Image (spheres, rainbow, N blue to C red):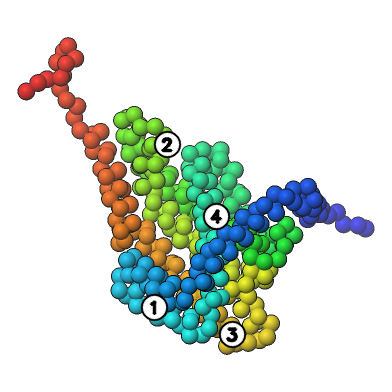
Amino acid sequence: MNEFRLPLGDLVEVFVDFLTEHLGFIFDFIRFIFAGAFEFVDLVLVSPPFYVILALAAGLALITRGWKFFAGTIIGLLLIVGVGQWENAMDTLALVLVASLIAMAVSIPLGILAAKSQVASAIIRPILDFMQTMPAFVYLIPALILFGLGEVPGIVATIIFSLAPGVRLTELGIRGVDPEVVEAGSAFGASPGRILRQIQLPLAMPTIMAGINQVIMLSLSMVVIAGMVGAGGLGQQVITSLNRIDIALGFEAGLAVVILAIFLDRLTAALGKGSTPIGRILAARRSRTSGSPAATHAAPAPVEPSGEPVRA
């Protein structure tokens, strides 16, 4: 007796074949854009001597978190240089930066849309649940078919894998803004766009920055999987060490990933607080915005029966 089987996988395969056959030019264009962005960022990071990038990273660390982070950044990056993984680390950093920027460019507008519309939120949330629970390796199969080997399928899989927290935390941050503040802006005649730009986004910025932090961390966690499709960098080194049973190479590449993760995590966490110049600007904007409702609660000026204001 033949067992009944739903051909869901076959339908997905037919759909991917349709995309490859009839919409291949679109994916060729996407591949061109993503590959060009990666090559540009990688060229910027790899071309200068290592001490130039190290000095820039150390200066950024000093500005954002102080001398302890400054010293830790120098020691960590020098350790990457010492184990001979500097170029691979910069390749990985370029991939993470490109994938994270694209993911943020998609996730933040989607989060704003979900916060503004219950219908959009109801549609987006199940999709995000699916994206987060589907094993990351599964994304590589259609990405390989549509984009071929190299960095681009790794970037695409990384974007899909890291998109969800950016959307969720952006929606959470905007929905968490005090409704009285929004009502105060509306009472003063501010347009919805101005309320979003000058009230909701500044007040939601700490939560949005937490989402950006998670996007970057998830992007970095995908480097090994991206290495399986020819993305290169530290992920390729880990795959090579696994194939060779090379403990030394695996430890050195893994340590370089950890150092990059700590640097990016501390950096993005600092940007969400008031401990940096950018953070202080955002904190000042939040303070001014959160103080605006007080004006709406002030007693109105007394008026004459004729409607004219009382003059002293």
Mark 1 crowdedness (10 Å alpha carbons): few <14, some 14-19, many ≥20: some
Q: Helix or strand or loop: what does disc 4 sit on?
A: helix
Residue 207 in view of the camera: yes
Amino acid type, label 4: Ile
Q: Indicate which disc, 2 or 4, sits on the residue closer to the N terminus.
A: 4
C-alpha gap between disc 3 and disc 4:
31 Å
Where is residue 275? Give x, y as percent.
30, 62
Residue of label 3 = 249
Dot 2 amino acid type: Gly
Amino acid at circle 3: Leu
Tags 1 and 2 touching, CB below 8 Å: no
Residue at 69% over, 82% down: 243
Give the camera-side residue of 21 and 266. 21
Between discs 3 and 4, the one toward the N terminus: 4
* Residue at the disc numbered 1: 74
Give whichever of discs 2 and 3 has the lower sequence position. 2
Disc 3 or disc 1, which is closer to the eye? 1
Residue sitting farthest toward the right: 1
As drawn, is 42 to the left or to the right of 274?
right
Mark earlier in primary sequence (4, 1) = 1
Distance from disc 4 to disc 1, alpha carbons, whole Å, reads 28 Å
What is the secondary structure assignment of the residue under circle 1?
helix
x, y percentage for residue 218? Answer: 53, 64
Q: What residue is shown with label 2?
A: 193
Which residue is drawn at the image coordinates 65% and 56% (left, top)?
Answer: 32
The kind of residue tagged 1 is: Ile
**Residue 175 on image: x %, y %:** 43, 44
Which residue bears the numbered disc 4? 102
